[in-house]
Image (spheres, coloured by chain):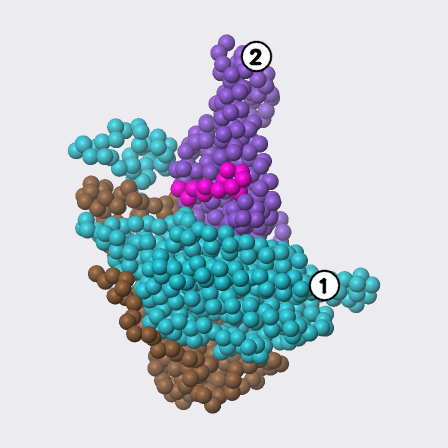
Amino acid sequence: MTGTRTIDVALSTSGLDAQGRPQRVPLAVDSAGNPVSVAPPPAMEPDYQGEHMLINIGPQHPATHGVLRLVLELDGETVVRCIPHIGYLHCGFEKIGEYRQYNQIIPWTDREDYLNSIGNNVAFALSAERLFGIDITPRCTVLRVIAAELSRIISHLVWLGTTCIDIGAFTPFLWAFQERENVYRLLENWVGARLTTSATRVGGMAADIPTGWVDQLRGFLTEFPRTIDEIDRMLTRNAIWVGRTVGLGAMSAEDAENYGLSGPMLRASGVAYDVRKDFPYLDYETYDFEVPVGTRGDVYDRFLVRMEEFRQSVRILEQAIDRLPDGPVNIDDPRVILPPKSKAMNEMESMIHHFKQVMEGPRPPIGEAYVAVESPKGEKGYYMVSDGTAKPVRWRIRPPSFVNLSAIPKLVEGHLLSDVIAINASIDIVMGEIDR
Amino acid sequence: MGLIARPDSTSAPTHAGPGGPTKVVSYQPQSSEGWVATKLDFLVNWGRANSLWPMPFGTACCAIEFMATAASKFDLARFGMERMSFSPRQADVLICAGRVPFKLAPIIRRIWQQMPQPKWCISMGACASSGGMFDNYAVVQGIDTIIPVDVYVPGCPPRPEGLIYGIRMLQEKVMRERLSDTTRLRREMDPDPSSRLFIPPPAIDELSEPFGNSVNQTRSAL
Amino acid sequence: MSTRLDTASETPTRIVYPGSADPSAPAPATPTRVPHRGGPENPSAAAIRTQFPDAVRRVDVVWAETTVVVPADRVLEIVRWLHDEPLHLYTYLSDVTAVEFRDPEEPLTVVWHLRSLAYRRFLRIKSELPPGAPLEVDSVWPVFKGADWLERECYDMFGIRFRGHPDLRRILMWEQYLEGFPLRKDFPLRGRFSRAEQLRQALAANPEARYSMEELSIADAFEDLPPAMRARLQGGEPTGE
């Protein structure tokens, strides 16, 4: 049978060739069972003269944080070269964005960086509102800050849990995911979903927070720092942890900037670039918070930067709760945002607006906009081009993990095989965002 | 009359199907199957069902919910599934959690082929079951086009309770298996052209042409 | 062979603070009431006009973002000048992408997003490739290493060739992908082939053909490999650098 590669082929032969050496299972066989050479692809593996070993990690692997494939050339246990292969989660997000109205794209932003779902919703809404020329209400601004910082916390919790597992500590994974459950309860009370929230709309939010939600958030903010302190006590001065992370995967500030790194990867290398401080949005310049910056750029510094970002996010959330103003969440523009159901069901004009918005969708003026936000992974932005129709001409996702991961060949060179896993974990990648 | 029951070709009832009369294999325990076989079935199935080692083929958001299901609040360990085997050679059930693009299709097929029998598959989430919201050039429209699936868990992503419901369904399916059932042993072969179920590739191509029932979804611009 | 201790820097890295080049500039603030057109122009756009007078086709300011449209063959020198020039210092490449419009008369536009961290500025450079012209443009990889994968993705999705790129091949789709370049407007959403054919081609892409452990890991058995496979292995797949 053509192309059968099952164990039947191997067992049908004696297993030894003419020289008595173990016979290779042929890659492809034709109908007669003869090996067929596969057409050589453009990129080829180098010629190994017997000294170096080729190791393939992935795409299915517990420690690659998704479907990433790393082909490593090893000299003993030291990495000589690393060739990453991505694209195993490419799902055509940007293509689909051209076939959906602006509000219909929001569920896609959830799934793309699925650890930062609600943060992506916020980023997309900001970009779309820039394209429409809309200023959102003060209440919506503060709610989006709350959403973005909660998103940062849960994304860093996944990073923490999975990095600990990769390096060998299993318990912080369970602690981190238990904290995630607490945030899930908050998000579920607000928007109805745990992970894929679709919480924002162009011009506002899908729903306002329910009564008592602020008290729940306060409760969370009281006990969450204790968990972070506990993890900190367990790891930061732990000899095993320090020994496994200090000095790994260091990157200088000039290189980091040149490679286009962003987020904790860049800040750990000593470049204090944070989109919230340098190109602010959502009134972040009015919040009192600090941006942790490392000095050596190794895995340990990235760990410290992210641990400190937990605390800074808690600080921002406390300020945001205190200043949450009353008022409407959505803007009062019926051409852009759906009218409240009570009006849509009772007034003719609102019903027409509702109908037009659902069937046609809001249409922005001709133009383009790019708004970047500081996602937990780095500088995230949506670049959208409009030709006046309800669906964008181009929806471009600027993926921080994609650009961060492109530096991995430089980061792992000269390190041991187990260090590759630690360095890969420290980059904090999400394959959904890399491959889109 | 031995312990193994075989469908008797002369006395088995037939059903007139589109390809001709097909034999109906009865799954009622035949009189030859004794108490020992039934208890052995129960013991084997109980052992298998309560120690299903999952192979989490997690790609996207569903993988995060799978991890949350395995974590403390929704604990998979109480079902015997806390030992995640990331090597397919040591796994019982492949849980495909997340969307599978075409580039990943040969990988998941290879992983499935590497799993030893008995093996099952849970397709977790809308994307693994049917392509989900990704009805485009890049995503496999359901992993059941590549590997045989036992349980489909809908949701985007399914709640941990939903995944646990799906796992319980799989456990019940495992409990209903019988050692005497020879069709249980799956043969990993390419399609057999002489089988009545075989549809020739040109006919498949015609059936699966990119045609959408929702024109709105595939219409760019207005 | 360096060990990991050698790669760590011995002395602490100097910290780079954005905005340090212009301390007198006003503190950045959230933009409100952004005008559609006619907003403040980035001073670097005027500087490019002065330095390269024949290269600037037009300058747009849309939603307070400045766009400079330049010819495809001048992009590398302009980007390099912006990177090196002490008054502008666009040392951060945010994105390289392309836009194809629905109107077939419109040119296919390649877009570069540059940031100057020292001056806290954002600039968009565009290059328009008219319909019918070959889709080729200079690669900015000599200036920005981060352009490597971004340009590969642009090639994969649009078919734009970047001259001077060290290793231009597909990155998101598999390398033998036959359907074309997905983000082009003439590429249908569901692809060109039937679902069954797409699946057949995907399964035949044979990702293990070059990397399977049973063929490659036993290095001293290299001579036992079939000659076709040996020929395939004798080549070079350069790394991301």
Image quadrant in which you'd find residue C96: bottom left
Residue that carries the numbered disc 1 in the rendered image: A211
Tell whether B64 sits left or right of B113: right
**Tag 2: amino acid:** Ser
Q: Please, what secondary structure does the residue beneath circle 2 have?
A: loop
- Which range is magenta? B76-87
Which chain's colour is cyan?
A
User: What hue does chain B carry in this figure?
Assistant: purple
- State yes or no: residue B105 in magenta: no
Check if mark 2 and mark 1 are on a common chain: no
Please tell me which residue is depicted at 39% across the width and 82% down the height of the picture.
C89
Residue C225 disc label:
none
Q: Position of residue C211 (x, y in %)?
A: 31, 48
Question: Which of the two discs, 2 and 1, sits closer to the camera?
Answer: 1
- Magenta region's main secondary structure? loop
Q: Position of residue A324 (x, y in %)?
A: 66, 72
